[in-house]
Amino acid sequence: MRREGRQIGIGRTRQVFEVPDDPHLVIKKEMREEISPREAKARFYLAKLLYLLLPKHFPQIHLSTSKPPVMVVEKKHLDEEHVDLNRKIIDSMASDKSPRLKKGSVKNFLHVRDQDERVLALRTQMVELGIENFDGSAINFAFDPQGHVVYLDTIDPWYPVCTDGSQETGS
């Protein structure tokens, strides 16, 4: 297993770290202790398929493990606005007194990103391909230097996302 470097992203269920010895990869680490080997394999092949279908919009996957639940994926270069927001979120979670995160700026970022035609087009394309269980939150979409929309979150193969953002965990 590769060792983690500096944290560069955080979400509701995962943290993202640089890979110190390979600047072209990142580690996506689940906040839970383990997932089933079946789920790790399904995530790997779904991520590989999404990359093959939409390589400009999904990172290439290199590894998926179950214990600990980790994915190693291609590092996509993201727009500075997205990188800055992630930095502020990480800083604010590390310190309750961090003045860098202002809710108004986050809401504005999310609103603008939500209305961007490129983001809307990728969401539509994903649904048309039958990928409906993705977290459509605007924070999960970034832009690469060429202006392509990149979907950053992991799509769980069999847990549909509910309207309130939580996930069903039924059989």
Image: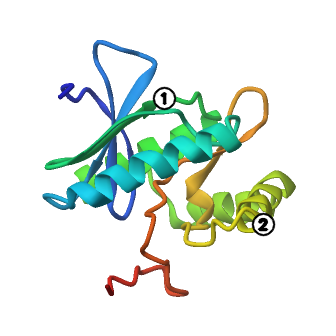
In percent of width and height, residue 164 lies at: 50, 86
Which residue is the extreme one toward the right? 117
On the rendered structure, is 65 left or right of 155?
A: left
> Which image quadrant: the N terminus?
top left
Rendered position, 22 above or below 54: above
**Which three-letter amino acid code belongs to the residue tagged 2?**
Glu
Q: Residue at x 65, y 57 (%)?
A: 109
Q: Residue at x 68, y 68 (%)?
A: 130
In percent of width and height, residue 144 lies at: 68, 32
Residue 128: image tag: 2
**Residues tagged 2 and 1 counted as in contact (Cβ below 8 A):** no
Mark 2: give few (<14), some (14-19) or many (20+) Cα within 10 Å. Answer: few
Mark toward the viewer: 2 or 1: 2
> Which image quadrant: the C terminus?
bottom left
Q: Which residue is mark 1?
A: 74
Which residue is the extreme one toward the top? 21
**Which three-letter amino acid code belongs to the residue tagged 1?**
Glu
Total marks shown come to 2
Q: Secondary structure at mark 2?
A: helix
Rendered position, 25 above or below 88: above
On the rendered structure, is 142 left or right of 15?
A: right
Give the Cα separation between the discs numbered 2 and 1: 25 Å
